[in-house]
Image (cartoon, helix red, strand yellow):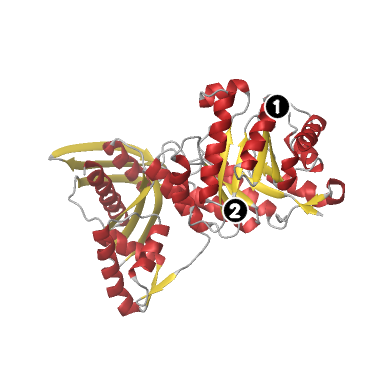
Amino acid sequence: MREVRISDITMKQSGTKDVSLTFKETLETAKLLDRLGADVIEIEGIDRRKIDGLRIKSIASSVKNSVLAVPVSLVPESAALTWNALREAAHPRLQVPAAVSPAQMEYIHHLKAPAMLTAIEDTVASCKALCADVEFIADDATRADSEFLCSAIKAAIESGASTVTVCDAAGAMLPREFGEFIEKLYAEVPELRDVVLGVGCSDELAMADACAVAAVMGGAGEVKAAAYPVNSVSLAKIVKILSAKSDTCGAVCKTGLTEMKRVTDQIRWMCETGRSEKSPFDNGVDDGGETIILTAEDDLPTVMKEVARLGYDLSEDDSIKVYDEFLRIARKKEKVAMKELEKVIASTAMQVPATFVLESYVINSGNVLTSTAHLKIKKNNRTLESVTLGDGPIDASFLAIEKIAGQHYELDDFRIQTVTEGREAMGEALVKIRHNGKVYSGRGISTDIIGSSIRAYINALNKIVYEEQE
């Protein structure tokens, strides 16, 4: 019995009005789908070169078993740029999406049919020269001219595409119509028998799952689905149908049902439980307890690989400073965990002049009143102040800092701990802020955890401001 591959498109929905995932949630979603056994995990391509390049590299290092698919645009440099970010993935795939209906060709790509065929051929060939696994995606295949669609598919296969996907973007077809559409394609393009034919279905008529099943019965070998479906095929439903009716469908899929509910519930929670508009804290994703231990025997490239995995992009000078401090600690402790490595980065890397300096803070908090923070911060010898409300004293304090800075930042991580004992114990805070795809960490120490948290956030903020000025 033939096997049908499941390609998850959940993360391609991120950034829409329906789904908004933070960087940390994106990594967690990729790990969950990888553990679930999704054959392919699709993510967004490169729009902002540096930020998106770092995002793709981080996800690539997290996905071990699934194919990681990233789209390229129909311009010459796009394939090489995307491949540079994706190349370290365990199982990389480059995708070439193209609108193939007359209206969309001109509206999206500003090309007519002959030029579109040339662009498809050239882009697929460029991708094939870099990556063995290339997918051509006909975005609105059901509205395309039949003759042109067949020509586009043949051109993509001749240029090296090993997977060809046709999409009913309008969602206007009924299951029987879509099944016949797939059978007709096989009849008109015999070359499709030598590659994998994939399908993508819109849920405009609430029939995406049924259309996908009809396509599988018509010979399709890959289905685009989403763990959190937004106008698309449901991952949980299509896997359940293929598992229960494999004999009828003439196909099976390897994506497991055992963990399906737990994984999809967790992804749904991240997609639906948006951060409060007034809070700097995100939904709070657990890293899954993954622990990596380094020792004094590890060389500079090994340590810097883990630093990059944590999300930091250090300069050569900072890399050497961090490694030297790491060695000093590792020789004393024998083993250094990731949390300790982050403290080394926060206290060693990118120590910069202070643009923002804490002058004073007044916090009001209790179980019968809303927490407030009144902060005075000096910037270039000018005192700025802000009074804000928050879900707690630290939440209110961070909001006050953001209000003074005039910008919201994604709070990637926040930790506090005591460093001394007794009534006058010192508290240490570590804050990680993500800005333009990079992570900046700050460390603060004070006799109270609120003061240390404020100082840590300002420390990280100063690093962002300094780098932007540079």
- Side (left or right) of 264 relative to 181: left
- Callout 1: helix, strand or loop? helix
- Side (left or right) of 100 relative to 338: right
Residue 88 is situated, as x and y percent measured from the top left of the image, at 48, 57
Residue 467 or residue 397, whichever sits in front = 467
User: Which residue corresponds to the image point at 62% horizontal and 50% vertical from the top-left?
Assistant: 40
Marks 1 and 2, how far apart at CA: 32 Å
Residue highlighted by disc 2: 67
User: Which residue corresponds to the image point at 60% horizontal and 59% vertical from the top-left?
Assistant: 65
Q: Residue 147 carries which label?
A: 1
- Side (left or right) of 416 relative to 44: left
Residue 138 is situated, as x and y percent measured from the top left of the image, at 63, 34
- Amino acid bearing label 1: Glu
Label 1 neighbour load within 10 Å: few <14, some 14-19, many 20+: few
104 relative to 163, above or below: above
- Answer yes or no: is residue 284 visible: no
User: Which residue corresponds to the image point at 78% horizontal and 41% vertical from the top-left?
Assistant: 213
Looking at marks 1 and 2 on the same chain, the residue that comes earlier in the sequence is marked by: 2
Residue 150 is situated, as x and y percent measured from the top left of the image, at 69, 32
Query: Which label lies toward us, 1 or 2?
Result: 1
337 relative to 379, above or below: below
Residue 173 is situated, as x and y percent measured from the top left of the image, at 75, 27
Q: Where is the C terminus found, in terms of image quarters?
A: top left
Residue 41 or residue 187, whichever sits in front = 187
Q: Where is the N terminus found, in terms of image quarters?
A: bottom right
